Image (cartoon, helix red, strand yellow):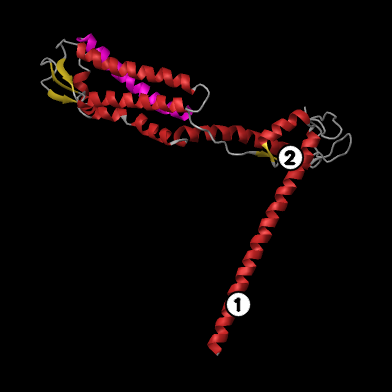
Amino acid sequence: MAVCPKCGEHLKISDWRQHCPHCGVNIVVYDLQERLMQQADIAEVQHYHFQKKIDRLKASFIGSKLAVVRIITSFIPVFALFLPVINAALNPRFSSYSGNISFITAYNNIDVVTQDGFLGSDRLLLVSIALLLLSIALWLIHFLLLMLACSKRAKGRAIIVNALILLTSFGSFFVFIADKSDAVLSGKPAIGFYLYLALQLINVIIDFIVLKQGIPVHHKQCYVGGIPIEEYFELQKTMSPEEIRAEQYKRLQAIQDEKEKEIAKANEAQAQEKEKEDDKESESEVQDNG
């Protein structure tokens, strides 16, 4: 239930007029300046907390030269899989294909991959493919988590995700090497697989180096009523709201006075420049007449 901002009396639903029925004050405009200042304080504090998140996000991507390098090394590993991943010959009962197989090749021949018994005939191959797909999912998660690289729990998350990336990537490779069955295919890893492992390893190494060095986060200075927000929080511990408000008006007036001085100086400089140009034009006219 609403109350009158002056007398504090409760207002009924029937008290819809802008004047308080108890004290007669205009509720709409009563102490309007103070209420606007209070709303401005709340908005500026909320902006401060949001600005901190933006500053951490910017630092995660461009906070240092190594952080920029990390974006590249975190992005490119999966593209190695568009190169030949394995060189293999399929079992004739599934297909007569023989040669290099990449992700593009597998996608274009999805009807062969989805045949009954294609993957079920070789459990180690199924495990190898599952680990490879899981490593790709972890790669995507790792890339998205770069946005939170300067948060409190970033280091712990990065260690877990990086460890899982290496485990699944190299696990897929070694399981494929250990698979001697030709029930589905027979072959060996190709350049794409080796490059994928190398890029994932570089990705993890660069990430750990960045985590060890750390990224400096430069926070944009925020103000509440002309007072630096860090100082504002300290003043709240030692001063009353009325005293803080008086200090805010003092700071805001000082800022306004400084701006007016700068404008006056700029106008004065502009006037002097114009006066010099007029003098040059006058001298030029005198010379022409002479």
In the displayed image of the protein, which residue is found farthest to the bottom?
A: 290
Secondary structure of the residue carrying tag 2 is helix
Q: Quadrant of the N terminus?
A: top right
Q: Position of residue 159 (x, y in %)?
A: 42, 19
Q: Position of residue 263 (x, y in %)?
A: 66, 58
Residue 279: numbered disc? 1
Instruction: Examine the structure image and report whether residue 129 is included in the region drawn in magenta.
Output: yes
Determine the residue positioned at 38% across, 27% down. 206
Q: Is 246 situated left or right of 120 in this image?
A: right
Q: Position of residue 47 (x, y in %)?
A: 61, 36
In the displayed structure, 68 sits above or below 115; it is below
Return the residue at label 2: 37
Prevailing secondary structure of the magenta residues? helix
Q: Quadrant of residue 39?
A: top right
Report the magenta residues as a range.
121-148
Q: Is 254 situated left or right of 98 in this image?
A: right
Q: Position of residue 70 (x, y in %)?
A: 39, 31
